[in-house]
Image (cartoon, rainbow, N blue to C red):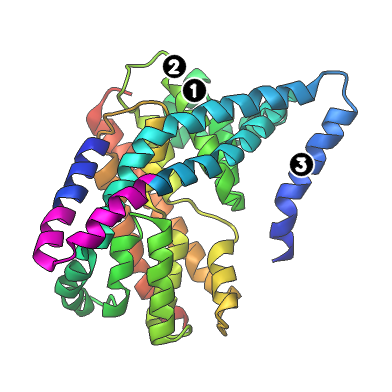
Amino acid sequence: MLGKCFSILCIVAFIFGAFNGSMESVSKSILEGADKSVTLCISLIGVMALWNGIMEILKESGIIKRVSRLLTPVMRLVFPSAFKSGIATEEITACISAGVLGVSNAVTPLAINAISKMERGKRKGVATNDMIMLCMLGCACFNIIPTTIIAIRQKMGATYTYEIIVPVWICSFACMVIGILLCRLMGKINGDS
Amino acid sequence: MGIVNYILPFIIFLLCVIILFSKKDYFSFFLRGAKNGLDGAIKLLPSMCALIIGVNMLLASGATEYLADWLAPLFDRIGVPEDIFPLIITRPLSFGASLATFTDIVTRCGVDSYAALCASIIMASTDTVFYVSCVYFSASEIKKTKYFMPVALFVMAVSVFLSCILARIFF
């Protein structure tokens, strides 16, 4: 999938660069991109270490287990095979809770954690329905307080800052529900978990 | 905004209480988890490098502006303001680029204008689909993602239309 995305992006960029006369900045952007990816990865190392460490303590102390048991009735509808087999339930719960609470820098490490846990013992290299669902929720997650956008709007001197919350709730909740339903439908059509 | 600032420090506080008052060696669990996180982050680098180079090239070539110029009038007819179209293209690709386009929209149209409000709702209720899926799946070396991309992009499109409708209703 990534191979296709990468090729399409680069080919389009090449054609437009030639056509547009912007080949100079295209060629510069390649090395800049390589540079940026390393910076991004290094900054991710710290966040990932922190959240994986926190996760380990929460797991060992049994807190997450309790929360995930509490959420099981709902989660079973969204992640049927994970919550049937009991694999990675704690990781999934932690990831979704972080998303809803708006701790956005925790979602990525926790999701990676959950997906690699789900992957164990499965067909190598192929995403399962539950993995796709988790990724979907990572992209369109309902969150209680959209902090980033409120902060930006405040900084820019907007009159409507907190008023934005209600439409964001409606929009992100609706998208989350649509995403979940579509994923379940496609999962059913695709058959194998 | 007060409560939000409390979440992370409170979690850390709670963990420190657990570490201090328990017989089990919880701090070593933390260190073990942190080490796993480190390994995970390193695994991301190869695919991240490829994706960011691709996105960077596309943004530098000016293709996104062309696309926006072509398609914006079409979207304008179905209720999506022309000004936010560049945001729709950059939003799934990169957070930095979408933030830049968002800032551009706000400075051009004014922060409380209809276009800026639509853009705000879009920014808050969608995510960088390409980046997220790249990171999530490549960390565990998953190559076939089946129906993920079409579904994610469809949901994103729904979110754009809904944002514009909601902005019209609420403001």
Report if the CB atoms under discs 3 and 2 are less than 8 Å apart: no
Between circles 1 and 3, the one closer to the viewer is 3
Indicate left or right for A93 with A65 as reference: left
What label sits on residue B73 in the rendered view? none
Disc 2 designates what residue?
Answer: A120
Say what secondary structure mark 1 lies in: helix
Measured from the top left, where is residue A163 in percent x and y?
56, 76
Main secondary structure along the magenta-highlighted residues? helix
Q: Categorize mark 3 by other alpha carbons within 10 Å: few (<14), some (14-19), many (20+).
A: few
Magenta residues? A12-34
Taking A177 as reference, is B165 above or below it? below
Most foreground residue, B62 or B139: B62
Residue position marked by numbered label 1 in the rendering: A117
Location of residue A14 (image quadrant) = bottom left
> Residue B9 location in percent, x, y?
76, 48
Image: A124 above or below A141: above
Q: Is residue A23 magenta?
A: yes
Residue at the far top: name it.
Answer: A121
Residue where numbered disc 3 is placed: B12
